[in-house]
Amino acid sequence: MAEEKPAVEVVKGVNGLDKVVLREVRGSSAEVYLYGGHVTSWKNDHGEELLFVSSKAIFKPPKAIRGGIPICFPQFGSHGTLEQHGFARNKLWSIDTDPPPFPVNSSGKAFVDLILKPSEEDAKLWPHSYEFRLRVTLGPGGDLMLTSRIRNTNNDGKAFSFTFAYHTYFSVSDISEVRVEGLETLDYLDNLQEKERFTEQGDAITFESEVDKIYLSTPSKIAIIDHEKKRTFVLRKDGLPDAVVWNPWDKKAKAMADFGDDEYKHMLCIEAAAVEKPITLKPGEEWKGRLELSAVPSSYCSGQLDPQKVLQG
Ligand SMILES: O=P(O)(O)OC[C@H]1O[C@@H](O)[C@H](O)[C@@H](O)[C@@H]1O
């Protein structure tokens, strides 16, 4: 019998939109829509979905898909003059068949390279020339890695600046049973209080109401402990100093047309981001931002787990 290999396949997704399916030999998988360069599924080797996508998500341009991992570029949130979260999440990306070499060897892994370049229409909104390359890789153990490489290809000598986020929606059993470790004692900007700056308390973060905060200069490793599911997500990031934490809670959930009224209970966004200090690139310069996600079983009972083990292990 032929040796099983990781598989990469382009198929039609919702509303006939193209999606790339990555499969690993042990059974884990991921799906990436060309619309938005948007990861919409990440399953472990038991076939369990690890990302949240709303049952009301609209898979139709120009609305970004509600859930998965939208890419916020060249603007995070309303931190600028562009549309909320920039335009990359509602553009049609292409498969990049000949990407420049990566320092990291992806051979033997399932991966896809996507590319976004500005259209004439985009250039009216953001008058810059760039190449945005996104590699999505599924590791043999089911880890999901996203690497963004953004290059300034302006030939008018002009630098440009941008803010960025991997707006990851994690699937959780029950938001009130979840805690986030790695953001304690950090400064954050509170989007619910006119982006005012505060300092977080010493305890791990738990959830009992709407939250929309940008934690600044965080450690590269953050853990989301899902008590009920006995699962811990570990997020590692590089080139992305900040981390956004968002849950709309009940009132905002009801106000969103593409989000179920009770779905806020089953999702949490922890977004590896560069917001406070925009990235500036001169012509010819390239920036790289990396996100690595893993999901590990945790037999966590309150007080049993040493958070330092999760964060340093
Ligand atoms: O509805 P959107 O544009 O996808 O944004 C969702 C949320 O995204 C978060 O990242 C922002 O901090 C929130 O302020 C925002 O409400």
Image (tube, rainbow, N blue to C red):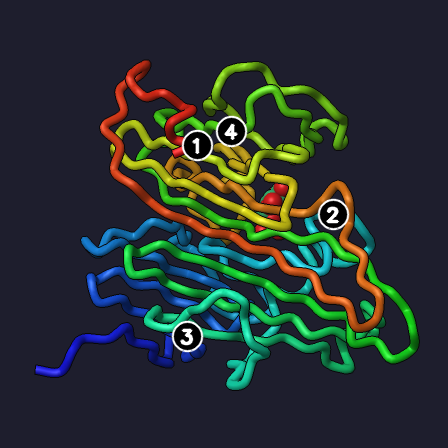
> Which residue corresponds to the image point at 18% horizontal and 53% vertical from the top-left?
46
How many neighbours does mark 1 have within 10 angstroms: few (below 14), some (14-19), or many (20 or more)? Answer: few
| Residue located beneath label 2 in the image | 78
- Where residue 255 sits, quadrant-wise, is top right
Mark 2: amino acid: Ser
How many neighbours does mark 4 have within 10 angstroms: few (below 14), some (14-19), or many (20 or more)? Answer: many
Mark 3: amino acid: Lys
Residue 212 horizontal side relative to residue 46, left or right: right
**Secondary element at image label 4:** loop
Measured as percent of width and height from the top left, residue 220 is found at 55, 40
Camera-nearest label, 2 or 3: 3
> In which quadrant is the N terminus drawn?
bottom left
What numbered label is drawn on residue 19? 3
| Residue located beneath label 4 in the image | 182
Disc 2 to disc 3: CB gap under 8 Å: no
Mark 2 Cβ inside 8 Å of ligand 1: yes
What numbered label is drawn on residue 312? 1
Q: Earlier in the sequence, mark 2 or mark 3?
A: 3
Disc 2 to disc 4: CB gap under 8 Å: no
